Amino acid sequence: MVNNEGAGLAVRDLVATYPGADGPATAVAGVDLDVPVGEVVALLGASGSGKSSLLRAVAGLEPVAGGTVRWAGRDLAGVPVHLRGFGLMFQDGQLFPHRSVAGNVGYGLAMARLPRAERRRRVQRLLDLVGLTGFGPRAVRTLSGGQAQRVALARALAPQPALLLLDEPLSALDRGLREHLTGELRDILRATGTTALYVTHDHDEAFTVADRVAVMIDGRLAQVDAPDRLWRAPAGREVAAFLGYGPFLPAQVTDGAARTALGEVPLGHGGAGGAVPPGPALLGLAPTALRVSGDGGIPVDVAAVRFRRGRSELDVVLPDGQRATAVAGPHPVAARRVRVRLDPAAAVVVPTDRG
């Protein structure tokens, strides 16, 4: 459906600021990012990390304080939003309440003066694609939240944008619906060959939708990688902690393995691009890295027990005083002291923090 040509999006040394009490504050600090044609890149970060500011700067909705934004080699400085050829989709959908579903989807096509018959065919095709066959005459005020976001997606795709920019498009929906629509959205973007920049704070959403995930921390890109590689090999403690690893234990890398108080982890299970040098390092624990063991393992004190998603999770105190999660079976655990084993596949080795 989409007919994109050229090198795609190229952001170089981009700086974006916003007014602060003591002068301009930096929201985006010298970011470089490429989004090749046909690829979906997710900007993943916490609130205030600068991800939406970066997207809005690419769209032309926010001024650029430094650096460049190019599409297919063309510098977009001075090009207004409506002439960039980009599609936009936001958290609330921003549908026109006085227009029908079909009227919303076809609005951009009407503005482009597409012949009515072709406009009707494209609207129908898009409604079929987003699972809203037969909804064309419906008033948008009668739609559920999920249906409204499907309409917003169809409207954004209708003009066949060179680049689709999505800013937290599913964050207003409840978790169950969001998880369902995330998979559908991924399939739709793939089916249409859409090039997209997708902003979210939800890890699962980013990992499901994107070909590559760009982790944004304090206005800068900390790491850009394929989802599986990002999870297996975060670039350092900062990225690993953001992804949910922790606590972090001292480790010593030697002979292709990291040795810790909890056991040994082969570097093939993780480690900053697989290239953690020999010497001191850190071992980060995923929430499932420790498992309660009937025999053997390390003895630890149990501080608390909770039942979650069909299993008991123990808040345990490690030998160095740090707290961690240990996974047990489906039955409650009454013991105040248990033994735990380390699952190497659920841990990651990263370089030590540099001073």
Image (spheres, grey):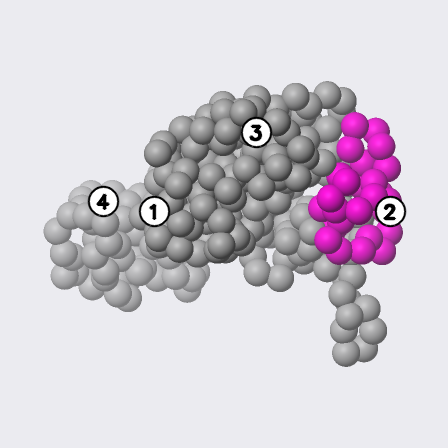
**Label 3 environment density (alpha carbons within 10 Å; few <14, some 14–19, many ≥20):** few
**Pointer 1 with pointer 3, Cβ within 8 A:** no
Residue marked by disc 2: 78
Going from N to C along the chain, the mark reached first, 4 or 1, is: 1
Does 20 lie within the magenta span?
A: no
| Stretch in magenta | 57-84
Q: In this orientation, which residue lies closer to the viewer: 28 or 149? A: 149
Residue marked by disc 3: 116
User: Rounded to the nearest whole Å, what is the CA distance between mark 3 and mark 2?
Assistant: 33 Å
Seen at 83% across and 43% down, the residue is 79
Going from N to C along the chain, the mark reached first, 4 or 3, is: 3
Judged by depth in the image, the label closer to the viewer, 1 or 3, is 3
Judged by depth in the image, the label closer to the viewer, 4 or 1, is 1
Residue marked by disc 1: 177
Judged by depth in the image, the label closer to the viewer, 4 or 3, is 3
Residue 35 pos. (x, y %): 68, 32
Which kind of residue does numbered mark 1 sit on?
Leu
Q: Residue furthest front?
A: 116
Judged by depth in the image, the label closer to the viewer, 3 or 2, is 3
User: Rounded to the nearest whole Å, what is the CA distance between mark 2 and mark 4?
Assistant: 63 Å
Residue 232 pos. (x, y %): 50, 35
Residue marked by disc 4: 293
